[in-house]
Every structure is written in C-alpha cells, then in structure tokens.
Image: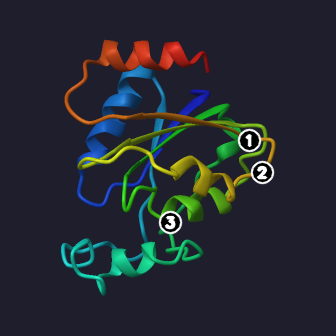
C-alpha cells in the first residue's frame, strides 16, 4: 500500500497524462476525480459565458457532483491533487472532492496544467474546503514533457 496518492480531474485528458506519469514516477496510487456528468467540448468553451464551465466558475460556491468517488483517503499521508487551471483557479469539482472526504492532518500538494496562466488564487480558494489541520502546498504547473526522474526529483525537493 502506497502512502501517497495522485488524485486528478481532467476534462480533456491533458491533466490525466501528467497525473499518470507522476504516479508512476513516485510510486503512488492514482485516482481519477470524475464528474457525474462528463464535460463536453461545448461545456468547456470558455469564450461562451453560458457554457457549463463558465457558469460554474462564476459561482465559487458551485459544487459539481462527483461520480463514484469511493476512495479511502485515510490510507494516505500525502495526496497530490491535479487539475487544469480554469479562470486562474482550480475547477470547483476540486472543492467538491475536498469537501467529500476527511483530509485532516494530510499533506496536499497541488499540481496543474494550464494554457498560459499560473496558480492565481487557487490555493486560497481551495483552503476554504479543507480542515485547518491540512497542510496545503502549492506545487507547480506541470506543462510540457517531464522525465520520471524530473518528477521524482521535484517531489523529493518538497520533503513530503
């Protein structure tokens, strides 16, 4: 049993590839955070203010439902949580994930993929969904190609 978990949400597959490689590089279990209703291309059209993702991201209290989220978080000390950056923050499904499990006394390391922006207020907006005893670490944007050694070295540098 691994004491590390890589949990991720990926609407288009980009973050999934990074999460799978990170899991392999550090010997962690992997868990996909899947929305109950899958996002379509039109749902993800950020240029359309009425698209599903645009509507959800305008309301930071919105919590998309998660499909079949049966994972025992208690088995893990450190959870790497990955997602695409939407509107300079994590998609609100990450808040749903945090609010659906007990992350007390856990270390959470964020990682993301992005078309051009950084983390923005991501950590700040996610912290509200976690217990005070959770250590939240703003990791890094993982765009591009990384070797397993580069990912492993990055995780080692975090000392988690």
Name the residue carrying label 1. 134
Q: Which mark is residue 56?
A: none
Q: Position of residue 57 (x, y in %)?
A: 44, 72
In the image, what residue occupies the spot 55% across and 19% down? 158
State which tag comes first along the sequence, 1 or 3.
Answer: 3
The CA distance from mark 1 to mark 3 is 18 Å
Q: Nearer the viewer, residue 121 or 90?
A: 121
> Where is residue 40 drawn, in percent x and y?
23, 74
Q: How is the image coloured?
A: rainbow
What x and y, as percent, mark residue 42?
20, 78
Quadrant including the C terminus:
top right
- Neighbor class of circle 2 (other Cα within 10 Å; few <14, some 14-19, many 20+) is some
| CB within 8 Å, label 2 to label 1 | yes
* Residue at screen point 59% across, 51% down: 71
Quadrant of the rendered image containing residue 107: top right
Image position of 23 (left or right of 40):
right
Residue positioned most to the bottom: 50
Q: Secondary structure at mark 1?
A: loop
Quadrant of the drawing holding the N terminus: top right
**What residue is disc 2 on?**
131
Relative depth, front residue between 145 and 5: 145
Real-space Cα distance between discs 2 and 3?
A: 17 Å
* Residue for badge 3: 92
- Residue 97 horizontal/vertical position (percent): 57, 59
- Element carrying mark 2: loop
- Classify mark 3: residues with Cα within 10 Å, few (<14), some (14-19) or many (20+): many
């Amino acid at each position: 049993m691994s004491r590390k978990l890589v949990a991720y949400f990926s609407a288009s597959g980009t973050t999934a590839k990074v999460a799978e490689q990170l899991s392999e590089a550090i010997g962690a279990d992997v868990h996909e955070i899947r929305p109950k209703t899958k996002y379509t291309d039109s749902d993800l059209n950020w240029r359309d203010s009425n698209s599903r993702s645009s509507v959800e991201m305008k309301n930071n209290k919105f919590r998309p439902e998660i499909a079949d989220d049966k994972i025992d978080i208690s088995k893990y000390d450190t959870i790497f949580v990955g997602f695409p950056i939407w509107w300079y923050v994590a998609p609100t499904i990450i808040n749903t994930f945090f609010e659906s499990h007990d992350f007390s006394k856990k270390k959470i390391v964020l990682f993301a993929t992005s078309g051009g922006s950084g983390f923005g207020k991501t950590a700040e907006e996610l912290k509200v969904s976690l217990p005070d005893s959770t250590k939240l670490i703003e990791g890094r944007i993982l765009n591009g190609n990384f070797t397993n050694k580069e990912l492993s070295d990055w995780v080692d540098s975090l000392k988690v």
